[in-house]
Image: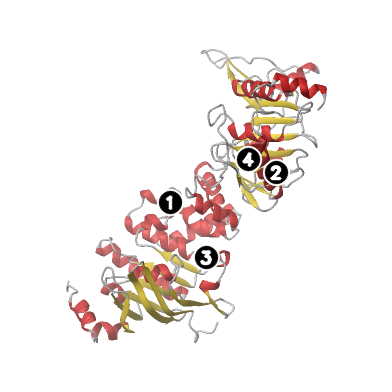
């Protein structure tokens, strides 16, 4: 794999909701192993951008180029649905803000983690269960709870289960939508620690959407600030947070409450 | 027109042959042809209002009406029995509206409409087995959106089906699904065999008869053409198994048939007998005798 070429290239991505703007002219390159944080206030187009990246929305304009494992770059919009869904199961992960949307709540933890494996044609119960148990260990969920459904899990455990479920097929690109919001700070800290460890260990490329600048600082290499559907500032995380150029970014940074 | 069919015409005054009008039967036949051409695929059809409530076999009745000819011999079973309400009323329905000959003998029938069982006797080429189906979508309880399940079928994404089986093993130690056990048809579509016990699943594989499935309320028809591969889904280390009974039929002594429990009184007396009444009667006529009623449990 050539790490000098971007894994994902986004060019002029635009999406309108009727007359209203979702996001406009978003462009960036994401390299293997890189973590990009997208920050901005509510309604700034962060989630629209993530939905576009996840192929849940179709863009009005612009394109997405994704580099496959064999090195060829493919335009996602021109791909057939079958191929795109296969990629979504094998190469991508999506950690949702609301774990109930990212998990099957009526299915046991083991079944949740094993689903992607079974979708890829694994048909050995013992092996699937073994892999699921291994992943529960990695995300610090007690293996004894493998047959419990996520309904019986706390918010932090649900998020960790979502991570296990997404990473079990060794994806290369993971999208995260506010993965830590709604969790109390100690749980948040452990989850961030876990994510940071896994990202480094597996060499994941990550796009993380967050309104929490502390999360962005802790996890990301680069940062992209959005406002009213447009990217207003990008740069290295430390650079943007320590020396913001745009007035809006300055406001955002200065609004953070010091503990 | 022959003399025989003329008398039938008179007997059936007021009804078209087999109740449905010819246009409707053509529409259903087109759906059946498509279903046969794509084994296991659920073909939508314009299900008609029938003179019986949904859930009583309106889908099966429409399929039967569409394939029935004046020379056919019809058998109708409900849970294997020819003498239950549903079976008797559907049989009488076609006696009155089509004037066809009816039978309870599996071997003599050319069209067999069934609810919840496949006859024990091996079906032969030329026979048509029509299933009444309440819920044709095997993925229904895993994915509630019909738009999504259709997409999953189209892309042959059946991982979800195995999640259900995985859950069974995780909870019960074995695959606890005993009826409506999902099957893969001809290596492509995953299909709900209707609520037949999984005991009957092996009979669907490489069956010489044509198997048609009609779901009236859900407006779907699907089919398994003769000699099609029908594989029950399973795991490599938890292979598909049919249930076994630890006793023979009390009446005919058959050790290899599907048994029903019949409660005789409120003091624990009960009898296990073949659910396929024709199979049981045939065996008894051949001189087979079962052990009879067992000692009641204390």
Circles 2 and 3: CB atoms closer than 8 Å: no
Measured Cα–Cα span from mark 2 to mark 3: 35 Å
The residue where tag 3 is placed is A169
Front: mark 2 or 4: 2
Measured Cα–Cα span from mark 1 to mark 4: 36 Å
Residue A186: x and y in percent read 26, 64
Circles 4 and 3: CB atoms closer than 8 Å: no
Q: Secondary structure at mark 3?
A: loop
Name the chain letter of the residue that bears numbered label 2.
B
Q: Residue furthest right?
A: B2
N-terminal of the two: label 2 or label 4? 4
Whether residue A226 is visible to the viewer of this picture, yes or no, is: yes
For residue B224, the mark is 2
User: Is the residue B196 above or below the residue A170 in the image?
Assistant: above
Residue A252: x and y in percent read 21, 77
Q: Secondary structure at mark 2?
A: strand
Residue A187: x and y in percent read 29, 62
N-terminal of the two: label 1 or label 3? 1
**Lateral position of residue A137 relative to residue B265, left or right:** left
The residue where tag 4 is placed is B193
Circles 2 and 1: CB atoms closer than 8 Å: no
Name the chain letter of the residue that bears numbered label 1.
A
Name the chain letter of the residue that bears numbered label 4.
B
The residue where tag 1 is placed is A144
Front: mark 1 or 4: 4
Measured Cα–Cα span from mark 1 to mark 3: 22 Å
Asked if badges 4 and 3 are on one and the same chain, I answer no
Quadrant of image for the C terminus of chain A: bottom left
The image quadrant that residue B9 belongs to is top right
Asked if badges 2 and 3 are on one and the same chain, I answer no
Q: Residue at x 79, y 26 (%)?
A: B108
Q: Residues within 10 Å of mark 1 (few under 14, many from 20)?
A: few
């Amino acid at each position: 794999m050539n790490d000098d070429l971007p894994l994902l290239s986004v060019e002029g991505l635009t999406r309108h909701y009727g007359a209203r703007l979702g996001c406009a002219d978003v462009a960036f390159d994401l390299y293997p192993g890189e973590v990009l944080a997208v920050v901005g206030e509510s309604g700034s187009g962060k989630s629209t951008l993530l939905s576009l990246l996840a192929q849940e929305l179709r863009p009005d304009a612009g394109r997405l180029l994704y580099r496959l494992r064999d090195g060829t770059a493919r335009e996602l919009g021109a791909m057939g649905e079958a191929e795109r869904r296969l990629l979504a199961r094998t190469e991508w992960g999506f950690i949702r803000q609301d774990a109930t949307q990212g998990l099957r709540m009526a299915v046991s933890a083991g079944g949740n983690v094993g689903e992607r494996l079974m979708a890829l044609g694994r048909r050995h119960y013992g092996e699937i269960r073994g892999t699921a148990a291994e992943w529960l260990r990695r995300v610090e969920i007690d293996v004894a709870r493998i047959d419990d459904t996520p309904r019986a899990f706390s918010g932090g455990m649900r998020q960790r289960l979502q991570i296990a479920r997404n990473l079990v097929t060794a994806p290369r690109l993971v999208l995260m939508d506010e993965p830590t919001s709604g969790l109390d700070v100690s749980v948040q800290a452990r989850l961030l620690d876990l994510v940071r460890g896994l990202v480094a260990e597996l060499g994941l490329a990550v796009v993380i959407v967050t309104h929490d600048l502390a999360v962005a600082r802790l996890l990301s290499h680069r940062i992209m600030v959005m406002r009213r559907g447009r990217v207003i500032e990008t740069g290295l995380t430390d650079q943007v947070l320590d020396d913001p150029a745009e007035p809006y970014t300055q406001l955002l940074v200065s609004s953070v409450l010091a503990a | 027109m022959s003399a025989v069919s003329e008398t039938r015409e008179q007997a059936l005054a007021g009804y078209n042959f087999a109740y449905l009008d010819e246009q409707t039967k053509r529409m259903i036949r087109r759906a059946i042809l498509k279903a046969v051409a794509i084994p296991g695929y659920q073909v939508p059809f314009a299900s008609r209002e029938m003179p019986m409530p949904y859930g009583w076999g309106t889908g099966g009745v429409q399929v039967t009406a569409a394939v029935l000819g004046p020379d056919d011999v019809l058998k109708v079973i409900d849970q294997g029995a020819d003498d239950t309400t549903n079976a008797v009323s559907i049989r009488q329905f076609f006696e009155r509206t089509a004037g066809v000959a009816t039978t309870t003998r599996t071997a003599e029938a050319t069209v067999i409409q069934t609810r919840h069982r496949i006859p024990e006797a091996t079906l032969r080429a030329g026979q048509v087995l029509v299933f009444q189906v309440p819920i044709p979508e095997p993925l229904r309880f895993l994915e509630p959106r019909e738009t999504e399940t259709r997409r999953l079928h189209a892309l042959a994404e059946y991982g979800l089906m195995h999640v259900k089986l995985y859950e069974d093993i995780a909870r019960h130690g074995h695959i606890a699904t005993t009826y409506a056990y999902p099957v893969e048809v001809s290596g492509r579509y995953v299909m709900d065999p209707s609520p037949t016990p999984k005991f009957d699943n092996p009979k669907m594989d490489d069956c010489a008869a044509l198997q048609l499935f009609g779901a009236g309320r859900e407006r779907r028809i699907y089919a398994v053409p003769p000699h099609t591969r029908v594989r029950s889904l399973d795991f490599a280390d938890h292979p598909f198994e049919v249930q076994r009974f630890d006793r023979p039929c009390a009446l005919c002594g058959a050790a290899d048939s599907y048994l029903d429990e019949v409660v005789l009184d409120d003091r624990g007396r009960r009898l296990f007998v073949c659910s396929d009444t024709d199979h049981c009667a045939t065996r008894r006529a051949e001189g087979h005798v079962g052990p009879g009623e067992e000692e009641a449990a204390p």
